Amino acid sequence: AGYNHYMQKEIFEQKESVFNTMRGRINFSTNSIVLGGLRNHITSINRCRRIIFIACGTSYHSSLATRELLEELTDLPVSVEIASDFLDRQTPIFRDDTCFFVSQSGETADTLVALEYCRSRGALCVGITNTVSSSIARLTDCGVFLNAGHEIGVASTKAYTSQIISIVLIALHLGQDKLSTTHRRNEIIEALKVLPLQVEEALKLDSTMKQVATTLKDSKSIILLGRGFQYATALEGALKIKELAYIHAEGIASGELKHGPLALVDQDMPTIIIATKDRLWDKVQNAFHQVISRKKNPIVFVNKGDTEIKQHVEFVLEIPQTVDCLQGILNVIPLQLLAYHLALLRNHNVDQPRHLAKSVTVQ
């Protein structure tokens, strides 16, 4: 269909995949959510002591990207665990906990062992996967399928954005009966309505990201800064660059910059700052000024119409603006494209990076 690699095809399929994840689950006329896979367990989840997300890699990042919204709409404590570390610590689990297991393939070994561990302790287990016949789909009490379509490239792209939407839908469903969150839920649902068109707009940055890749292709290391919802975006962007371009990349929380990482910032360290508008924008500005005082020209992601940052740097990427909890979907797409073009420029196998497998079936 005119694509050179499966990964390229999957990046550009995201307009359709995000729509398919929402299809039949949102009634835009009543601003209500229907998740059939959770219907019989919503009350139990709302009454639980805490929510725990357990995942690996990209699925861990999508869980981090949505944690704040879940806490906001459910008033429950939400933790996000790397499956291997969760098992190493033998984390205490109780019968009134709800544990979510996130995996594109549904066969991730560490996540499956964590699932068995939580089941044995009586917790309610919820699966979020893209594969209907997978082990996670069979072993969990209930769950949500991504409906993102088959993903062949080892580096996950469309599954990541569909995971974020799926967890956002779960958060909206859990908070559906709370009058205090009605305005916030309506705002998010309205944003979901136009999200596929905004994804299409973000994909138009492909040629721009190819130019950025040309300037970064010989880099030994890259720093990505994000805060709040965008910290997960920085982590996921860094992971894609590591997976595909074999360049050391580190996603750093902007609030941690002064606690050590600032020592790395100089003229020779490529730095990407995610500075799209949300309630933490003023704090992100602080990190931005810390960087430009030591480095003349970071690459900065801003929303369309933001002229303030443009005054200080040459390379600014304008991203469509949406509600804060969905902005990461639009911000990660240029980073996926950047990783893809870096891999091509460095003559690497885009669909099959060295040493990696699509589904990690051993611990």
Image (tube, grey):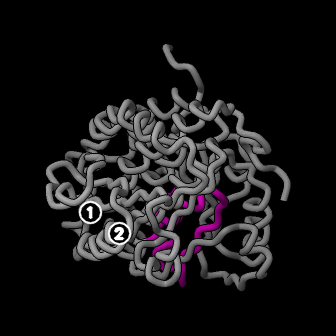
Residue 109: percent from the left, percent from the top?
Answer: 79, 56
Q: Quadrant of residue 139?
A: bottom right
Q: Nearer the viewer, residue 315 or 332?
A: 315
Report helix, strand or loop for mark 1. helix
> Is tag 2's residue or tag 1's residue first in the polypeptide sequence?
2
Q: Which mark is residue 185?
A: 1
Amino acid type at mark 1: Arg
Q: Which mark is residue 175?
A: 2
Residue drawn 64% across the image and 57% down it = 57
| Magenta segment | 38-67
Can residue 53 be found in the magenta stretch? yes
Residue drawn 55% across the image and 38% down it = 342
Q: Is residue 326 visible?
A: no
Residue 153: percent from the left, percent from the top?
Answer: 64, 34
Nearer mark to the viewer, of 2 and 1? 1
Residue drawn 26% across the image and 50% down it = 314
Graded by Cα atoms within 10 Å as few (under 14), some (14 to 19) or many (20 or more), the crowding at tag 1 reads many
Q: Nearer the viewer, residue 60 or 264?
A: 264
Q: Point out the residue furthest to the front here.
A: 267
Q: Nearer the viewer, residue 158 or 37?
A: 158
What is the distance, in whole Å, between disc 2 and disc 1 at their CAs?
A: 8 Å
Q: Pointers 2 and 1 in contact (CB under 8 A)?
A: yes
Task: Work out whether 297 lies above or below 183.
Answer: above
Residue 183: percent from the left, percent from the top?
Answer: 19, 66
**In the image, 183: left or right of 118?**
left
